[in-house]
Image: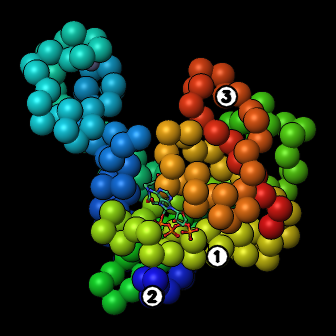
Amino acid sequence: MLVVFIRPYKKSDIDQVIAVYKSAFAEPPWDEFKKCSACEVEYGIKESARARDICKKCDSPLELIDFWSSEDIIQDLEFALSQQNKAVLVAENSAGIAGFTWGYKLPFEKFPFLEGKISPGTLYMDEIAVRGDRRLRGAGTRLGQAFLKSAKAQGLEEAALRTDERNPASIALFRKLGFKEMGINDPGFPNRVYMRVKT
Ligand SMILES: CC(C)(COP(=O)(O)OP(=O)(O)OC[C@H]1O[C@@H](n2cnc3c(N)ncnc32)[C@H](O)[C@@H]1OP(=O)(O)O)[C@@H](O)C(=O)NCCC(=O)NCCS
Ligand SMILES: [Zn+2]
């Protein structure tokens, strides 16, 4: 068990949150380490190291840039922070920030196919991640539990999220937290899994 303290995000956490974010999503199944500057197709860590001079997808001369720029992450985080109903939390121990989660009231305009299938009072977990070297020691569970507690405290009766069926770590975490698969097909993204839980 990793002894972590869960608390609301504060501005001075930003550099550590960005570092955890970039490293967590650079790994499989996300492989969001680098991308082609022309077509934005992703290149994982190993793939980037052996990439040739032509893009695997668009055939243009390959220029690899960070998949997630710091600005992208800040923009996502600021969006969450700007919402009326939200939970933006970090897990911290004496060595610094081990992980984070953030989310906001489910925006149905972004997920029209969830309309009628889930309560209008749903807190959507947009992100959760734990540093690679601090995983499997309960930090994700603690973050998830705090997220659900925050939803309930805000009067939101459900929480929902989406993940990828090729990600056993997140599926195991979300099942442990009580999330169940909704059986939703996201048009164009066959590997996406939508899950929900009562708070
Ligand atoms: C998903 C993630 C946040 C889990 O964080 P964590 O701190 O390792 O989670 P916990 O230690 O609380 O583990 C929760 C449960 O999931 C299980 N689990 C975690 N990783 C697992 C893995 N790779 N394979 C199988 N089970 C796993 C744990 O065993 C635990 O269950 P248990 O208590 O019954 O043993 C972490 O793996 C991560 O940051 N992944 C990359 C980012 C990501 O994919 N985020 C989710 C996007 S939708
Ligand atoms: Zn390309």
* Of the pair 53 and 74, the residue shown nearer to us: 53
Residue 79, quarter of the rendered image: bottom right
Residue 78 visible within the image: no
- The label shown at residue 186 is 3
Q: How is the image coloured?
A: rainbow
* Quadrant that contains the C terminus: bottom right
**Percent position (x, y) of residue 55?**
21, 17
* Of the pair 81 and 153, the residue shown nearer to us: 153
**Percent position (x, y) of residue 128?**
52, 60
Left or right: 68 as drawn, with respect to 36: right
Q: Secondary structure at mark 2?
A: loop
Left or right: 93 as drawn, with respect to 33: right
Instruction: Please tell me which residue is depicted at 58% across the width and 61% down the height of the picture.
Output: 173
- The label shown at residue 3 is 2
The outermost residue toward the top is: 59
Instruction: Please tell me which residue is depicted at 66% across the width and 50% down the height of the picture.
Output: 161
Whichever of callouts 1 and 2 sits on the residue coming sooner in the sequence is: 2
CA neighbours of label 3 inside 10 A, class few (<14), some (14 to 19), many (20+): some
Residue 7, quarter of the rendered image: bottom right
Q: Mark 1 sits on what residue?
A: 146
Residue 194, quarter of the rendered image: top right
